[in-house]
Image: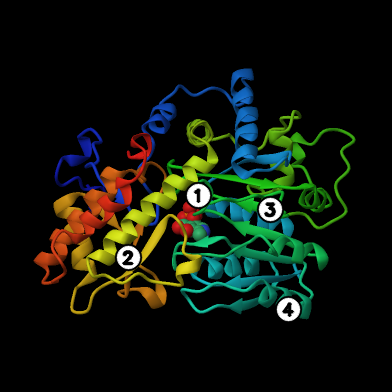
């Protein structure tokens, strides 16, 4: 047997049984049990009328989640960056000028993807832990005459959320398009796609939507659809007779070609990829849960959970990271106390309590932990478990805060709520 094929411990033949964890990092997070159940439903053929009906339902459901009337609201198979790549590769014609305001790691990701699409990228940067004022963005847009702004809504790397209400209008006034990465905020914080004049926006299931990684719900308006159709080409093997290709340059990626995805998700049902059926079931269930609970109720559950967590952390004597006004509702940055080994604490939380909290990237690595309160995780029992475990582990690592203060402070936040919401 070659070295790479050696099976040295027999575990490979054991049934899959991952250890139970409480996922309180910046995503992925625990799944709603209903989503897991939906994913185990039987697979249907992609043109089965029952399946295409599910596809239509997914479009309807995510229009409501995104607060939009956009016809083009569907799933891109792949993690959140699949949706980002589909939009950027379809919207950017090589040579286009694109403005990327960066306030964390994921702004850098947008820059990198836009560059790969052949854009001339202009960036402005905000110090990590802060966001932009709208006029900073406007000035950069006007100065550089960009065709598109691509930016992140909530950047999990810094835990900051960029207010977006005014950015769409700035783009319209300057004849530019607005693309938003809402991977970490959809379902956790308000997003009004139509009211905020966002042209294209993408997300992933694995954060506030409470699903698994591997599907990216996206929506875009007719301004984007027109641009994409101007570049429309169809694969030869499925091209209808009399089809006339768009005049614009062919979209570089086949998999992420929005024009072909639109044909696939429209009543034309023109074959493209094989839809990831189990992921579609998952996405459908995530949206149904959130809409049945109500968007406002879901957002307030996220707000409540992060408030209880933050009050608890502060009471323990820990310091929160970042500009308070613009913190996301669903991930909290907290400074690792002096003389404490942050990775050791994280490892002990996982080993001894089964709780995963997040490390950090780039300039924040070793400086802050990131604790997520997303989707199904947003329950009182999880917040209290996290605080009491962190308290115990920190204490064993030599940190001397007031005993049990974190849990008590979180109890205080929950105390005055009506029983029904005190979950
Ligand atoms: C804000 C943001 N954008 C994009 C991504 C990339 O998502 P994925 O890993 O699902 O491709 C992440 C993942 O953490 C994120 O937080």
Give the structural element (helix, strand or loop) at label 1.
loop
Q: CA distance from mark 2 to mark 4?
A: 35 Å
**Is residue 107 left or right of 265 when viewed as pictured?**
left
For disc 1, the neighbor class at 10 Å (few under 14, some 14 to 19, many from 20) is some
Q: Quadrant of residue 399?
A: bottom left
Q: Residue at x 73, y 57 (%)?
A: 91
Q: Is there any visible trace of residue 213 in the rendered image?
A: no
Q: CA distance from mark 4 to mark 1?
A: 33 Å
**Is residue 254 left or right of 30 when viewed as pictured?**
right
Residue sitting farthest toward the front: 416
* Above/below status of 363 relative to 318: below
* Residue that mark 1 sits on: 79
Residue sitting farthest toward the top: 49
Q: Is mark 1 within 8 Å of ligand 1?
A: yes
Q: Residue at x 41, y 49 (%)?
A: 374
In the rendered structure, which disc, 1 or 2, sits on the residue that comes first in sequence?
Answer: 1
In the rendering, which numbered label is found on residue 139? 4
* Residue that mark 3 sits on: 200
In the rendered structure, which disc, 3 or 2, sits on the residue that comes first in sequence?
Answer: 3
Q: Residue at x 22, y 65 (%)?
A: 316
Q: Residue at x 67, y 48 (%)?
A: 254
* Above/below status of 288 relative to 203: above
Q: Nearer the viewer, mark 1 or mark 2?
A: 2
Q: CA distance from mark 1 to mark 2?
A: 20 Å
């Amino acid at each position: 047997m070659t070295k790479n094929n050696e099976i040295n411990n027999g575990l490979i033949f054991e049934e899959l049984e991952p250890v139970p964890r409480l996922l309180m990092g910046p995503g992925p997070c625990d799944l709603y049990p209903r989503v897991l159940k939906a994913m185990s439903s039987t697979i249907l053929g992609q043109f089965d009328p029952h399946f295409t009906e599910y596809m239509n339902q997914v479009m309807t459901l995510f229009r409501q989640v995104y607060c939009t009337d956009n016809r083009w609201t569907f799933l891109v198979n792949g993690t959140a960056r699949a949706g980002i790549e589909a939009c950027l590769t379809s919207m950017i014609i090589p040579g286009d000028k694109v403005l990327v305001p960066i306030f964390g790691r994921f702004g850098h990701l947008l820059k990198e993807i836009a560059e790969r699409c052949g854009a001339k990228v202009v960036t402005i940067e905000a110090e990590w832990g802060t966001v932009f004022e709208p006029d900073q963005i406007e000035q950069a847009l006007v100065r550089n005459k960009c065709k598109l702004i691509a930016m992140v809504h909530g950047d999990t790397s810094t835990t900051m959320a960029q207010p977006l209400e005014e950015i769409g209008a700035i783009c319209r006034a300057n004849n530019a398009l607005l693309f938003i990465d809402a991977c970490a905020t959809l379902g956790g914080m308000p997003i009004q796609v139509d009211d905020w004049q966002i042209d294209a926006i993408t997300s992933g299931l694995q954060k506030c939507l409470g699903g698994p990684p591997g599907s990216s719900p996206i929506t875009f308006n007719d301004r984007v659809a027109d641009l994409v159709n101007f570049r429309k080409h169809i694969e030869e093997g499925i091209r209808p007779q009399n089809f006339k290709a768009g005049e614009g340059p062919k979209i570089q990626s086949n998999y992420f070609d929005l024009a072909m995805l639109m044909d696939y998700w429209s009543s034309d049902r023109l074959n493209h990829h094989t839809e990831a059926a189990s992921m579609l079931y998952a996405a459908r269930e995530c949206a149904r849960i959130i809409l049945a609970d109500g968007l406002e109720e879901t957002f307030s559950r996220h707000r409540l959970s992060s408030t209880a967590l933050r009050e608890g952390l502060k009471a323990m004597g820990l310091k929160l990271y970042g500009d308070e006004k613009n913190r996301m509702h669903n991930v909290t940055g907290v400074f690792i106390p002096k003389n404490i080994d942050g990775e050791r604490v994280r490892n002990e939380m996982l080993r001894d309590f089964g709780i995963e909290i997040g490390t950090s990237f780039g300039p924040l690595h070793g400086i802050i932990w990131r604790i997520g309160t997303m989707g199904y995780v947003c329950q009182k029992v999880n917040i209290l478990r996290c605080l009491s475990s962190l308290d115990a582990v920190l204490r064993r690592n030599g940190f001397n805060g007031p005993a049990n203060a974190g849990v008590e402070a979180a109890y205080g936040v929950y105390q005055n709520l009506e029983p029904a919401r005190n979950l």
